Amino acid sequence: MRKIFGKKSLLMVLLCLGMLLLFAAPALAVDELYTLELETEEDNVLKVGETGELTITYQGGDSVAENVYLTLTAEADNGYAAVQFYANKDANDEITECQISQGNNNVTVYIKASMQEIKDKVTITAEDGSGGIGRIVFDVERPYLADLDIVVDDEILVNDRAEVTINLLDQWRNAYIVPESVQEIIIGLDCLNIVDGTKGGAFFAHLFGGNQEANWKKFRYGQAAIKKVSIGEGESSVTIYFQPDPIWWESSDMNGELIFTYENGSTGQPAEKSSPITVKPAGSSYAYIWWYDSENDEEEWGYVPHQEVGKPLEVVVRLYDQYGNYQYSDGKTKVILTAEGIKGTGDLKFYSNSACIEESEDVILITPEGETHQHIYLKATKALEYEVTCNIEGSTWYDWGTVHFYPGPALSMKMATTDSDGYIKIWNGESLGKSNSSQWTVIKINAYDEYDNLTWFRDPGLTAQLTSTIGKFYDDDGDIITQFPIEKGEFGYRYAPVKFASMEAGEAEISAKVPGIDVEPVTIIVADALPAELKIRNVPNFAYPGEEVALAVQLLNDDGTTAWDKEVNILVTLDGKEIYQETVTIGEKGKFDYIHFKGERFCFTVPDDSSIDYTQGIQVKATFGTLERTEKILVADVTAKLYKGWNLFSTPYRLENARLDDVVADPDAIEIAYGYRDGEWYQLTGDDAMLIPLNAYYIKMKEDSWAKILGKRDVPSAPPVKELNTGWNLIGQAYDVVNGMEEMPIEEAFQNLIDFNFNLQEEILDIKFNILISPGINQQVPWVLTLNGFLGGSYDLPDLEYLTIRAFEGYWIHMTEEGYLTGFSWTPVQHLE
């Protein structure tokens, strides 16, 4: 026994007993050492989001001898329990352990569960580290989408949008906040039974948008309609907008349902939520005019009704919303009516009864209360097309329609004329179709109704008998007539196709007789044609001294015809002195035909006298009674054209009047002018405005004009001479007046600048210039002549045979040495023939 139970054996036994006690102790501690109690809204169930109170109590005595530290853990059937521990009820201080303080036997902590599965069974363990353990098992129930709460007004106007708020509810009717694990909830949108059991509206993400005329079901106010809406993580509601479809031609309330579909979070099956809604017609927004067909009791729109003047036209003014739904009046709705003649001043008025006895105001009330329309009557006595408008008081929108009141039957007739104002000239006997239209007029016989509206003849077979104190009536063929048939007219006015003309002056009283109808006569004054205008024809712009000028004078009547056998006085003056006077008779004999006019010819000769000042030109004056006509003819030996823009101009000899303003026919057309001397430019103004022979000038014109060249006539003149300096000089041609040469070869124009061998003319001894330029100014032909390397002796100048210098133009010449340019003499008897 001792061996068996030796010291070594005893140790083994004690070790085994100790191990048994070690493994057996925890099982006893679970039930005895600590107890865990959980306090929640529902027994043994912790809802997600709820804060549960967990009390841990020590079972080994009334209190602990020293602080006991407990480790807290939570496990679930599927693994992670998603339960957190907190030191306070606010759940803002997460912990993983707690302690039972010395002298106490319990401690309280708080737990919350986060979203995982819908429902978990969770075990919480408290362990003190010395083998003391406590456990509690409970259910954690998490929320799911169980229902929808729809917030929307149960009534909406047809032209409005209703705000719809969709709230998510969990199984406890609390707000369901979309968790991270779900991410979003999709809600389907639909509507039923608003119009005849069909869909009747659309949902939108926003309240306002753009074009309302877009497709109602897919696109409203510039927005696309939506068929579903999502509520994202962390959200529990969403707001959208519902708009009904327009309810055409309905005036009653329409009931329907808004349908929302979703997936139930518990079953995973589709679920549906509906909300009733009533669509009501919009408020009284618009007033429309309808033409009323009393025979068929129908209202018509979109055409122009016709009514005879003096008779009422029944119309209906009806209230609508913007979609065409009838609107009921509140008995105070005011509609403003206006009427205006489209092509004249009318007199259309509104009446409240068909007898049109009492005129209505232009503002009517839609009465009684509850009515949608009002019958009124239109009446006019002036035959016109009228525009009738109506709009609700205070609204800028209006409806309009057109109505045509046509004339009544003919009760009287009046005679009138066309385009003559009761006044014509004596007929000259030519064809009425070819003669001046002022010599005849068209006679009209117009019919009028009882309101003096011009109307048409409704009865066929009438004949008008015509009479006049002077003159005769003609048809379109020019045959004389005394009567004409009056045709039955359609919609429009009829007049007699009759022309009246008279070869006798006086007062013509024209009358007509139509059976059964009084015709008011018309009076026409037939007057002699009176001379009204003098014209002098064939007037030239210029004449030169010694030239015979042939003109013609014409006298026109006030009807545009030529006045014959009239005496016209002609007076021609020059320098304030009479050079021609005659009284000519415009008559059939010896009449002068000139292209498009008829008149009398006369001639005179321009004097060539050194004592005459030709500056102001010739004045030709024609006089007949109080009628006068004056024409001016400029005098010049020769003329040169000045073009709009820049011109290079020169004069070849001394002028009678050398100032630039006297030389240019229209001095107002001169914009600016420059000369060039001694290497410098100067402007032609003041004393520098005199044109010097053989000098050239740059003249800029505002428009085309003429330069009148008139040589000095007082005494014979010596040839002009221009001194040429070394270098550049601006010169003009020396014009050979005697021989009438407007252009000369270079060797003749500048012969004093070229030294020839008089024994042998072809041999050139010296040339004083080396460059000669004709600038391309306006119409002047441009060219350049260069003469370089001349050493004397025989010198070939081939270009001199082809280049010429022209009168009145200007040239640049570059002198190699000083020289002189000489011109030709002028005497009073020399001029260009």
Image (tube, rainbow, N blue to C red):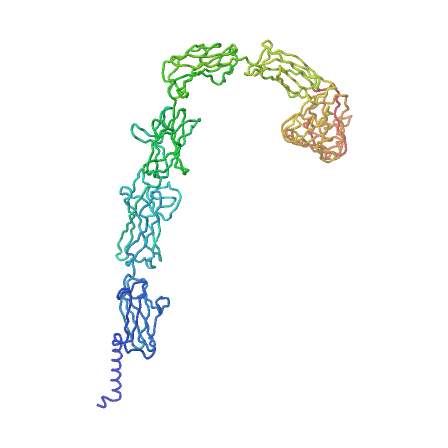
Height in image: 516 above or below 349? above
Q: For the point 30% across and 45% down, which residue is it?
A: 278
In the displayed orientation, state which residue is furthest to the bottom.
2
Which one is nearer the viewer's eye here, 207 or 779?
207
As drawn, which residue projects farthest toward the top?
A: 589
Q: Quadrant of residue 21?
A: bottom left
Quarter of the image holding residue 576?
top right
Count of numbered circles on the image: 0
Quick check: 802 left or right of 342? Answer: right
- Asked whether 50 or 578 is in front, the reply is 50
Q: Position of residue 438 (x, y in %)?
A: 51, 16
Q: Residue at x 43, y 28 (%)?
A: 342
Say which of 763 and 361 sits in front. Answer: 361
When asked about the image quadrant of residue 96, the answer is: bottom left
User: Would you say 131 lies left or right of 475 here?
Assistant: left
In the figure, is residue 343 to the left or right of 299? right
Whole-percent x and y of residue 333? 36, 38
The residue at 78%/26% (across/down) is 758
- Quadrant occupied by the C terminus: top right
Q: Residue 755: in sight, yes or no?
A: yes
**Residue placed most toward the observer, 245 or 755:** 245
The spot of residue 313 in percent (x, y) is: 35, 27
Task: Work out whether residue 782 can be spotted.
Answer: no
Q: Position of residue 778 (x, y in %)?
A: 64, 30
Of all residues shown, which one is farthest toward the front? 358
Horizontally, residue 513 falls left or right of residue 832, namely left
Q: Quadrant of the N terminus?
A: bottom left
